[in-house]
Amino acid sequence: MDKIDRSIVYLLQKDGKITIKEIAERLNLTTTPIFERVKKLEREGYIKSYKAILDRKKIGLQLMVFCNVTLNLHQTDYLKKFEKDIQQFPEVVECYHVAGMFDYLIKIYAEDMERYQDFLSNKLASLENISKVQSSFVMTEVKDSTYLPIP
């Protein structure tokens, strides 16, 4: 990625609906090279997708929870099974295999504590090989960003 590509990606991260024409105007270029560069960035995987970011509270998801999960067994098959199984739950919006005191960090949205308890008791607890689950409830979102710093 050169300087122009970085500028394009910067503008698209700030506003995914910005037009090719608007990008070209801001970078003092014509639309054709901007269009070609955007298509190349998409083709090469720098730009993965374009999405609408919803306000979770407005759609009724009042509770955000970070859940630390520890597994009993750590052989590859058990890890892969957990990773496959966790994806079936729409409440889980992010899942990371991490190093440290636990094996996975998952981010969960729920309507309220009752719905989270239902998720925990009837969904997460139904998965095999879970040894320990520790939940942390978000009190305040200090920073919530999808923007990536571009080196």
Image: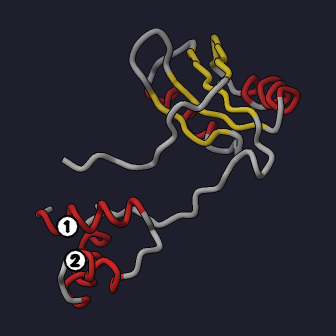
Q: Nearer the viewer, residue 57 or 76?
A: 57
Q: Identify the disc placed on residue 37.
A: 2
- Residue at 22% across / 77% down in the picture? 37
Q: Secondary structure at mark 1?
A: helix
Residue type marked 2: Arg
Residue 131 position, x and y percent, is: 63, 11
Residue 124 position within the rendered picture, expressed as x and y whole percent measured from the top left: 72, 28
Side of 116 relative to 49 (left or right) = right
Depth order, front residue of 91/126? 91
Which residue is at a point 59% across and 32% down the rendered structure image?
141
Left or right position of 104 against 1: right
Residue ID at (65%, 39%): 92
Whether pointer 2 and pointer 1 mark residues with C-beta atoms closer than 8 Å, the reply is yes
Question: In the image shown, does 27 or 45 lie closer to the viewer?
Answer: 27
What residue is rendered at 67% in x and 51% in y? 55
* Residue 56: % across, % down: 70, 47
Query: What is the spatial separation of the Cα atoms under label 2 and label 1, in whole angstroms?
Result: 7 Å
Inspect the image, locate mark 1, and give the three-letter code of the amino acid beneath it: Asp
Q: Nearer the viewer, residue 126 or 78?
A: 126
Q: Quadrant of residue 132?
A: top right
Disc on the earlier residue, 2 or 1? 1
According to the picture, the residue beneath numbered tag 1 turns out to be 5
Q: Residues within 10 Å of mark 2 (few under 14, many from 20)?
A: some
Q: In what element is the residue under mark 2?
A: helix
Look at the picture and state if 64 lies above or below 146. Answer: above
Report the side of 65 relative to 104 (left or right): right
